[in-house]
Image (cartoon, rainbow, N blue to C red):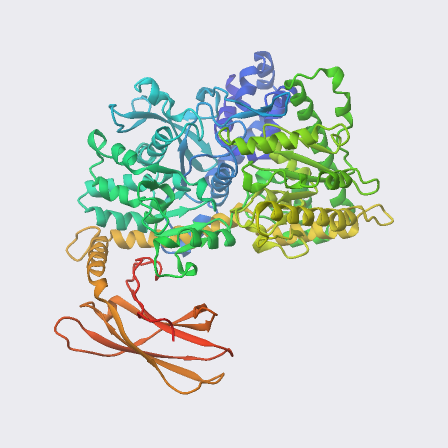
Amino acid sequence: MPEPLASLDELIVNLRWSWHPETLDLFAAIDGELWAACGQDPVRLLWDVPPGRLDRLAGDRRFLRRLSGAAGDLHEYLTCPRWYQALSERVEGAPAAIAYFSPEFGITAALAQYSGGLGILAGDHLKAASDLGVPIIGVGLLYRHGYFTQSLSPEAGQLEHYPNNDPEGFPLTPLRNGDGTPVQVAVAIPGSCALVARVWLAQVGRVPLLLLDSCVEQNEPALREVTDRLYGGGGEHRLRQELLLGIGGVRAVRAYCDLTGHPAPEVFHTNEGHAGFLGVERIREYAVGGLSFDEALEICRGGTVFTIHTPVPAGIDRFPTELVERYLSGDCDQGLPVGRVAGLGAETYPGGDPEVFNMAVMGTRLAQRVNGVSALHGKVSREMFDGLWPGFDAAEVPIGSVTNGVHGATWVAREVSALADRGMGTDVGEHGPAWDRFELIADKEIWAVRRLLRERLVTTARSRLRASWRQRGASDAELGWISDVLDPDVLTIGFARRVPAYKRLTLMLRDPARLTGLLLDADRPLQIVIAGKAHPADEDGKRLIRQMVQFADEPRVRHRIVFLPDYDMALARAMVQGCDVWLNNPMRPLEACGTSGMKAALNGGLNVSIRDGWWDEWLDGSNGWEIGTADGAGDQGRRDDLEASALYDVLGQHVAPLFYDRDGDGLPGRWIKMVKHTLSSLGPKVLASRMVQEYVTKLYVPANRTSRALAAAGADGTRYQAARELADWKRRISRAWPGVRVEHVEASGGKLKLGEEITVRATVALAGLSPAEVTVELVYGRVGEHDEIIQPAYASLAKEGSGSSPDEAVFCYSGTVGLDRPGPFGYTVRVLPCHPLLASRAESGLITVPPSRPA
């Protein structure tokens, strides 16, 4: 490259260009046609641009000024203090660094290392962390074939293709040692010397993303294929991927920090169970340093956050326990007791399989802080995993939630950002504007932008549809009808996501005649743009795609409904920006979050959705519509029929009339009012910046405080003294707990009235434990028809005195609560372990209650 253009290299290898409009415009100025033809991939652009063009640009003073400005802007972005730096000055315990592990990352289509929502969420997490200055290190795998690209057969079936990705063609740099040799990490594998992986660096703004690549010469052929495909293979192949991601990933982080001087992570974030073996490697590190397994486990747990992303048990990786044991013993020995490691993933609860190693179960046991990705998903997760905390109500299971968010600068159309800038003058990408100011923007301006985005989607859909039909074998002479597909003035509905059965791609087809009537309505027609991929092994998902494509192929409706294959980030961006309505109709409560609807909302799209995921908590009646659910409707077919009918009703009786109700200026005033309200009410909530800030304040900072406390030296200077004491305390509590008993409970007598108080006394045998090591609680509330306490409240009882038994102390506890509700009232008493380094009352999994039912 000519010397005056050297700054282009710096701009290309930092993926901030993927969400920075000025840098994207700079790349387009190199060669606009070529930029579009290469899919906005700057590496391919510079490979293909004629050398003469670069020579001319090297002498173009206007272009060089733009290049200098973009490079300077990037330097300022990378070096200036941001939100996290200000937080660190006023909040004790802000981590020096956080390691964020995920099996996939969706940063840009030019780095195709994602399959769907999990990867896009991980990419948005890194981008928002960069914007906020949060010191995250991302860790993943580099897949040589990535996820599959999708096309359709002439018979409407899904076809999969696996492109061969050359890392040299990605905006990556190899991580190198001081002597220039590539950095490699190794993980022991049965029957082999080791599984070796090279480390590549993707710079995501301020955030380094380390990607491990097993396609190296040292590996035997089978091991070179470990990172061949995202979610490829099964069984042993998948286990190898997850061992490399977890164990190898921690080793890659250590190597990166040693080479660059980057602060070592104090908190580790496991994004879904696939990366769970990172905890095993961290335990090994502490064990090498002299800690026992239990002591190492405590300090590992204290500094680990685990995020669950699926409410579907089938979405969790499970391996035969004997396979996991084989990979962690013998010549693969990590220096840890194999039985203890295998026990981390054991399904030791009613209904669990004792022969199975469950990655999500391991994730919950290796992290002191666990969360779902929406409020409803947190509740579902507590119910899924309540068997790990026997004796506790599901509501007390220590799994919280941080509702997902999306990266505004990646997903918000420039035209919407321009409206925001004109109305607020702030940066949509970092913190989000003062969204309520959208109310001040003229209706005609908002409507003009919405029509422009809809028209752009129509153009994109026609182009992709034409390409798809050509792949299916059609000639240009047969495709003249595509020029009339979709209409930029017709109400446009989007539906795009992965295609497992529970997301119900074909719910809209339950009554084809009724759907056809909505599509072809003479006065208020609908048009629907659909995209999605089924996993290559999911034959049911492929069948659903075939059904949808066959319906969309029918000449009578094909101008009003299209299925666009090969759903990727570029198509997703066009759809969430251009659709008036985003449709989501999963089986409640099986949608963990559903972030695509958030992206549509940030562009002024309205949601029509089953009340699931994020929509369950943020629907307010004026930012979209709820599809009624039929949870109690017998068989699945009956449920689908009822919910499809509710969908048709919402679209035909509420959505379409509002869209086509125009005033004297031809504007749908009530519709635009909902658009403004959506931007105002959801804009501040659905941004990934809000999500990352919550992770920092609710999870990362508390985890780091715990981790530091556990690592602190004792009075004699011994490191990890608190971790040693906590592990010893848990062992002692576990041994003594079978002897802990609630011997007697009584309450102040008489018939109680509303507004009065009840005093409860309990006698508790502590089996040699001290009162400081337990909490005795009164559990009380309304009583249901089966004598259960409904929505119980809790109150700590105070110790009154102690006994003098030679074998066990017996203590009396008492407390008073008010009766603030009429109706049946019940109470009981329970005993829990208590320690200042426990993050929740249920963490230990130990509880003692009276043998009888509540009084």
Where in the figure is residue 177, as x and y percent of width and height?
A: 31, 26
Between residues 217 and 424, which one lies in front from this camera angle? 217
Front-most of residues 295 and 127: 295
Relative to 711, residue 511 above or below: above
- 804 and 348: which is toward the camera: 348
Query: Is residue 835 shown left or right of residue 593?
Result: left
Residue at (47%, 44%) from the top-left corner? 312
Q: Does residue 552 appear left or right of residue 314 in this picture?
A: right
Q: Is residue 334 above or below residue 482?
A: below
Q: Where in the figure is residue 155, as x and y percent of width and height? A: 63, 22
Picture coordinates of residue 852, whole percent (x, y): 33, 71
Q: Residue at x 39, y 74 (%)?
A: 827
Q: In the figure, is residue 753 to the left or right of 331?
A: right
Q: Residue furthest right?
A: 664
Residue 199's spot in the image, x, y percent?
Answer: 36, 27
Q: Quadrant of residue 176?
A: top left
Foreground residue among 345 and 15: 345
Q: Can residue 806 be spotted in the picture? A: yes
Is 371 on the left-hand or right-hand side of 500? Answer: left
